[in-house]
Image (spheres, rainbow, N blue to C red):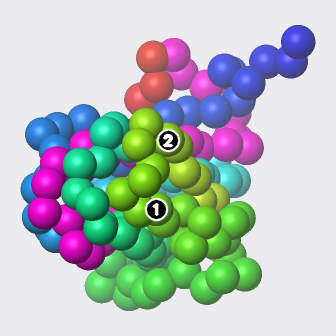
Amino acid sequence: MRDITNHINIRPAIPPAAAITDNTVLTTSILDLQGFGSACLAIGTGVLLSTAATFAVALFEADDLAFTTGSAVNAIDMNGTTALAGFNQAADNLCFKIGYCGNKRYIRATVTPTGNNAGAPISAVWILGHPAFVPTANPPV
């Protein structure tokens, strides 16, 4: 069996919290890609109680931490699509992912609900890959 643990790092993106009950946009933490050559956002859902909600995912990139030069990531710089990373109310207890393969130093994402009027527990983590140095720290830093 091959080792993945020493070749990735994990950072919180959307920490577990109380389920959102409206259309509040969830914005991830900003991820600094320095020292890594790839990144993936892994989104997990709990039981989605709304009967007609959709959740759209968008990915953004920037050269600066303040995102003053930030913009939406072009499809060519994604592994997967924002459509595949999005989901609806039927996606109870599932995971979704979208990867980044662009050349900016910082990225962040949003999960935007529409039609959400009940509990929607959502959390996410950033997974960093292709590190400049291995093994990566454990616990991740």
Residue 109 visible within the image: no
Disc sitting over residue 87 in the figure: 1
Helix, strand or loop status at disc 1: strand
Tell whether label 1 touches label 2 (CB within 8 Å): yes
Number of numbered tags placed on the structure image: 2
Most foreground residue, 29 or 131: 29
Sequence order check: which comes first, mark 2 or mark 1?
Answer: 1
* Residue picked out by circle 2: 94
Residue 121 visible within the image: yes
User: What amino acid is found at the position of numbered circle 2 in the picture?
Assistant: Leu
In the displayed structure image, the side of residue 83 where residue 16 appears, left or right:
left
User: Residue 8 in the image: x percent, y percent?
Assistant: 64, 33
In the displayed structure image, the side of residue 127 where residue 13 appears, left or right:
left
User: Residue 38 in the image: x percent, y percent?
Assistant: 67, 54
State the residue at coordinates (61%, 85%). Answer: 74
Name the quadrant of the N terminus: top right
State the residue at coordinates (71%, 29%). Answer: 7
User: Residue 26 in the image: x percent, y percent?
Assistant: 24, 61
In the displayed structure image, the side of residue 140 where residue 8 appears, left or right:
right
